[in-house]
Image (cartoon, grey):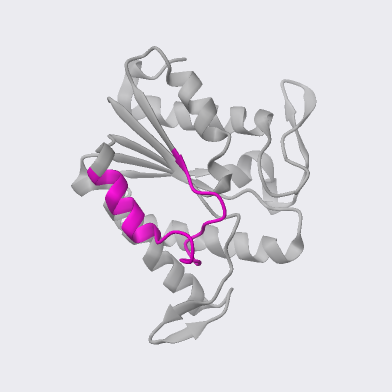
Amino acid sequence: LSTVLVTGGSMSMPLDAELARALAGGGVEVVRDPRVGTGLSITGIVDWGRLSTKQVETDTPEAVVMFVGANEGFPLKYDGRNVECCSTEWAAAYATRARTLMNNYRQGGAARVYWLLLPAPRDERRQAISRTVNAAITAAAAPYLGQVRLLDMAAIFTPDFEYSDTIDVDGEEQLVREEDGIHLNDEGSRIATERVLERMRADFGDQIPGG
């Protein structure tokens, strides 16, 4: 393991900084490439299919950490027509886009991909979108489970997909969400980082600190 790419939408911040700090001094370069305001269902700012190809060509990371989904729910093309979220067709179209990214990032099986599923947001309408996104990502990963690891942030931060600003950490309630009810705050990102490192340690052993 020489290079880790941390990317995605605004959900990947400050996760990228936490991972960079955790891996500092271990001979591992962390490439931080968050793209704020982007999503897989919106291409006006970034086309993630093209971007993921460029990222791999530029950095050839052995591990990719992906966290996207705060800005989703836009209409997608399915069978030649626009479909709205959160229909079965929309989920299928989203899964196709996610699978393309996973395939690019896994680099023919040479790399490992750590894709974080979304915790429930506060807003009920957004909850429906996030549920569908998580289901689509899970379906997308099915062919690539040898290289793609899905990390369920909902299980950690919002069990049963019920929103909460706080969780129990070592017997104390800790605030883990930003005021917008969507993003993880510094403490939440620290906890998410621990989960990512734990899963990376299973793949890369002693190169990952904390084992």
At horizontal 62% and vertical 43% (from top left) the residue drawn is: 155
Residue 6 relative to residue 182: left or right: left
- Kindly identify the residue that appears in the image at 62 percent across and 65 percent down: 129
In the visual, does 33 lie left or right of 107? right
Q: Position of residue 192 (x, y in %)?
A: 57, 33
Q: Position of residue 56 (x, y in %)?
A: 27, 45
In magenta stretch: residue 48? yes
> Dividing the picture into quarters, in which one does residue 206 lie?
top left
> Quarter of the image containing the C terminus?
top left
Q: Is residue 83 above or below residue 112?
A: below
Which picture quadrant has residue 141?
Answer: bottom left
Q: For the point 47% across and 62% down, which residue is it?
A: 40
- Residue 209 lies, with reference to residue 110, above or below; the image says above
Q: Is residue 79 visible?
A: yes
Q: Is residue 192 magenta?
A: no
Residue 146 visible here: no
The number of numbered badges drawn on the structure is 0
> For this view, does 115 lie left or right of residue 166?
left
Q: Residue furthest top?
A: 25
The region drawn magenta spans 33-57
Look at 55% across and 55% down and name the residue there.
Answer: 69
Name the side, left or right, on which 9 lies relative to 175.
left
Which residue is at the front of the view, 167 or 96? Answer: 96
The x, y position of residue 43, in whole percent, is 46, 66
Q: Quadrant of the N terminus?
A: top left
Spot occupied by residue 139 in the image (x, y as percentages of width and height) = 42, 61
* Residue 163 position (above or below residue 3): below
